[in-house]
Structure formats: structure tokens, C-alpha cells
Amino acid sequence: MGVQPTIMRRRLLGAALAAAALAAAGLTPVRAFAEDVTVKIDNFAFAPAQLTVKPGTTVTWVNEDDIPHTVVASAKAFRSKALDTDDKFSFTFTTPGSYGYFCSLHPHMQGTVVVSE
């Protein structure tokens, strides 16, 4: 037998309206619970050096130091160019796990982003 065509159209219209409402609000299902986070680079350190985020979170590193720095994932998931003062680099974390990173110009500078559900 199946669902009557009128009911099917209403269900599809309802789903489309819900998706449009989310899009208009600037939300997507993946990022609905994610937050954007900023890590400051200053005085040869990442602050915070360790943070935990949800999948879909975008982390932005901002160089507030007087010299260039980089942001390089130990496992090669991401790599910035040399960031001069006030330059930014962003990466969106979609897969749960632990992501160690460092400055390739100053390897003692290290940080970790943990992505958990």
C-alpha cells in the first residue's frame, strides 16, 4: 500500500522547511553543538596549550607575538604558513582524537587539541 502521496509531500516539505530554518539561522546539524575556539600565540607559547572540543569545532590560532610562528600537527593533519604578528590560521576538527601540534620554528612550543563527542 505505502504512504499516500499527500502525506509524503507534507513530510518532505516539513523536512525541507526544517533544513531551511537551520540554514537561515546559520546552523548545520554537524556544527549545532560545536563552538569556535581561539588559541593565542604569545611569548613563545600557545594559550591555552591544551583544549578539548566537540567535532565540527573550528580552532583559530592568532599570533600576538612579535616574531613569526607556525602551527603544525605532529600527525600532519594541518600546517600553517609562517604567521606574522596578528596573522591567523584556522582548522576545523571533524574526527574525534588527540591532535598534538607545535611551532616548526620553535619546536619547544607545543599544544594539544582533543576532539571528543
Image (cartoon, helix red, strand yellow):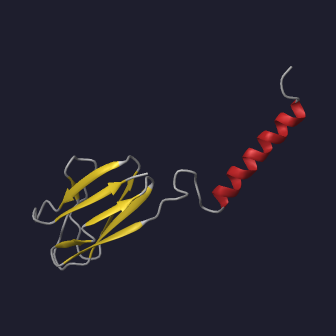
Residue 108 in which image quadrant? bottom left
Taking the image as shown, residue 25 lies to the left or right of residue 77, namely: right
Instruction: Give the x, y percent position of residue 74.
Output: 19, 51
Compared with 75, 70 (above or below) is below
Q: Quadrant of the N terminus?
A: top right
Instruction: Give the x, y percent position of residue 11.
Output: 80, 40
Q: Which residue lies furthest to the top in this view?
A: 1
Taking the image as shown, residue 91 lies to the left or right of residue 50, namely: right
Badge count: 0
Q: Residue furthest front?
A: 117
At 57% across and 51% down in the image, what residue appears?
29
Instruction: Give the x, y percent position of residue 111.
Output: 22, 63
At 15% across and 74% down in the image, what residue appears?
44
At 32% across and 56% down in the image, what residue appears?
114
Compared with 37, 17 (above or below) is above
Taking the image as shown, residue 107 lies to the left or right of residue 97, namely: left
Instruction: Give the x, y percent position of residue 30.
Output: 52, 51
Residue 59 in which image quadrant? bottom left
Compared with 114, 95 (above or below) is above
Q: Nearer the viewer, residue 50 or 18?
A: 50
